[in-house]
Amino acid sequence: MAAIYLIRHGQASFGNADYDKLSAIGIKQSKILGEHWQRESIPSKTYSGDLLRHGQTLEYFMESFQNKQIPVVLHSGFNEFDHVDILTCYNTEWHNFAEMSADIKQLKEPNNIFQKEFAAALDRWISGEFDNEYQESWPQFKTRCNRALQDLIQKELINNRQANPNKAKVSKDILVFTSGGTIAVTIQHILQLNDEQALKINQQSKNTSVSKLLFSKNNLSVDYFNNYSHLTLAGADWVTFR
């Protein structure tokens, strides 16, 4: 069986004008993961969402991994949901995410306040009662992510069938640089979990954590979820979830 490693991006720049850009911590987390992967098997291919934080996580991972010969495929199907759209539909005063997060930072216990409000915004999004208000509804998001995974698997299976007669190298370990929400609905689909369980998975996902899937022609399974041991070994301060 072949393996797909779903890698959540490094910490983004919450509260800054460009949230999508990795923070200094996020850059270091990506480098720590790349250094850790030097002890793992060399990936045969890499997929990445096309958000800036995906590309930067991949960039700093590769810089530390020190192997630039791995093919990279950009795939927007692995992009995260639009948190700004979800927050704006929940509260129209939050159309500017940078200003909203900066305002929240001035309050007592800003992280707790934001998490509470964001959880409420996500609950509204997945309720199904307001699907027409969002640029991408919850069902549409899940469908997009699952299609991206199936597209990857089908392409790799085809490539492997074509490669075998010529004894060419087949894809065995594939990295996917993506986001927490995408990983959560992927796990949800495979394990047939409900929406509430999918949100809990999303809340548990740490920056640069690794979740491993196994696939073959007729099977798809979860080997493990949310492994961030590379961060804990480097020091507990590197472990973040946002």
Image (cartoon, helix red, strand yellow):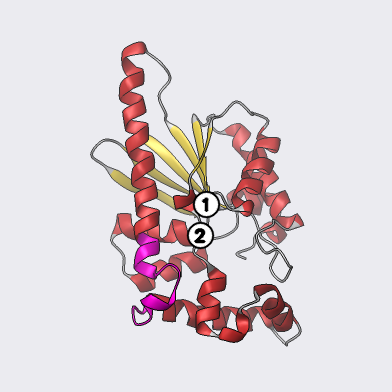
Residue pictured at 73% horizontal, 56% vertical? 25
Q: Which residue is mark 1?
A: 178
Residue at 48% over, 50% down? 76
Is 111 or 87 nearer to us in this picture? 87
Q: Is residue 196 left or right of residue 116?
A: left
Which one is earlier in the sequence, the residue at label 2 or at label 1?
2
Mark 2 nearby-residue class (10 Å; few <14, some 14–19, many ≥20)? some
The quarter of the rendered structure image containing the C terminus is bottom right
Left/right of residue 10 with respect to residue 193 in the rendered view: right
Q: Residue 64 at what x, y percent from top left?
A: 70, 37
Where disc 2 sits, the SS reads loop
The answer to whether residue 212 is above or below residue 73 is: below
Q: Position of residue 26 (x, y in %)?
A: 69, 55
* Most foreground residue, 212 or 102: 102
Magenta part of the chain: 127-142
Give the residue furthest to the top: 166
Q: According to the image, label 2 marks what residue?
A: 80
Q: Which corner quadrant of the image does residue 128 belong to?
A: bottom left
Amino acid type assigned to the residue bearing label 2 in the image: Glu
Residue at 40% x, 24% y: name it. 170
Q: Is residue 139 magenta?
A: yes
**Residues at badges 2 and 1 in contact (C-beta under 8 Å)?**
yes
Locate residue 192, reporting x and y percent.
28, 61
Name, please, the residue furthest toward the left: 218
What is the CA distance from the residue labelled 2 to the residue labelled 1? 7 Å
In which quadrant will I find the N terminus? top left
Picture quadrant where residue 91 is located:
bottom right
Tell me where residue 111 appears, x and y as whole percent.
Answer: 65, 78
